[in-house]
Image (spheres, helix red, strand yellow):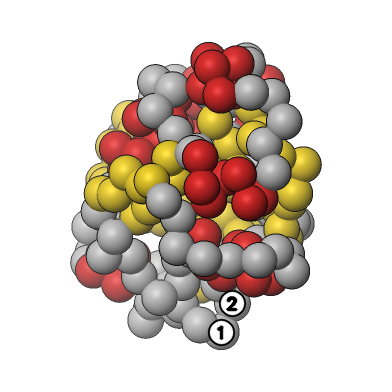
Amino acid sequence: MQRLLRELSDETARLRRRGDSRQLTLASSPTIASIWLARQLPAFQRAHPHIEIRILTVEDPHRLDLGEFDLGIYYHVPFEVDPPGLTAHAIFADEEVAAVCSPIYLERHGKHITPEALLSDHTLMVVEDHYHDWLTWEIWFSELGLAWRPPEHTLRANSFQLLMNATLAGQGVTLGWMRLLEAEIRQGNLVPAMAHRLQSRGKLSLFTP
């Protein structure tokens, strides 16, 4: 978080030097913008009350127009997903991915969920039309050494934000990036469905044109 605030402050100084000191445009995916970024901005705005924040939501960083924004905040897989003209700097040194659900869902379906039961008795949130950097349930199971087969019950959508809202509403279990969801977990809105965690290849990063 301190890294992010420092980078934003540096960008603010750059805007002043070029004579455009009023507005800072941050590009991000809808999920990151709504779940994580919106929670981080109050501290920056208290430190820089003269700066107006504009948030541009674009799901795929490859579709960004470099002239439309000042900084981007996305998950970045080194050497695999490098949008042209952007330099990525990790905001957090590491990141873990876990199966998460709402406390209401866990209470309703039993507090001890096994990997086998997850595939047979529970609803898994599945992102469709994802980009090749996305961590799927199958890859998560495989890299943890867990037996995989197609789940019996799924809720599918082409929006992780929509599926996250469904998870918060108690409709199923999703893969959650723990740094991204830190506030939701701290407030008790989400809980790990199982103890298994996988180190994420992608890291929440600041993209600089």
Q: Position of residue 23 (x, y in %)?
A: 30, 38
User: Please, what is the three-letter code of the amino acid marked with disc 1?
Assistant: Phe
Residue under the point 29% across and 37% down: 162
22 lies left or right of 40: left
| Residue drawn where x is 53% and y is 51% of the image | 119
User: 174 or 108: which is nearer to us?
Assistant: 108
Determine whether, in the image, residue 74 is placed left or right of residue 70.
right
Residue 121 in the image: above or below residue 112 = below
Residue 10 horizontal/vertical position (percent): 56, 49
For the N terminus, the quadrant is top right
As measured in the structure, the alpha-carbon distance from the residue carrying label 1 to the one carrying label 2 is 4 Å
Instruction: Identify residue for label 2.
Output: 78
* Residue 163 visible at all: yes
User: Split into 4 quadrants, where in the image is the C terminus?
Assistant: bottom left
Residues 187 and 167: in front is 167
**Amino acid at dot 2:** Pro
Q: Nearer the viewer, residue 63 or 8?
A: 63
Circle 2 packing at 10 Å, graded few (<14), some (14-19), many (20+), is: some
Q: Is 165 situated left or right of 43 in this image?
A: left
Query: Which residue does the image show at 39% across and 28% down from the upper left?
Result: 171
Q: Position of residue 201 (x, y in %)?
A: 64, 68
How far across and how far down the image is residue 35, in percent?
45, 32
Kindly tell me whether residue 21 is visible in this rendering.
no
Which quadrant of the figure has residue 127? bottom left
Label 1: which secondary element: loop
201 w.r.t. 82: above or below: above
Task: Tell me where residue 18 sits by quadrant.
Answer: bottom left
Q: Mark 1 highlights which residue?
A: 79
Dot 1 and dot 2 residues touching (CB under 8 Å): yes
User: Quadrant of residue 5 in the image?
Assistant: top right
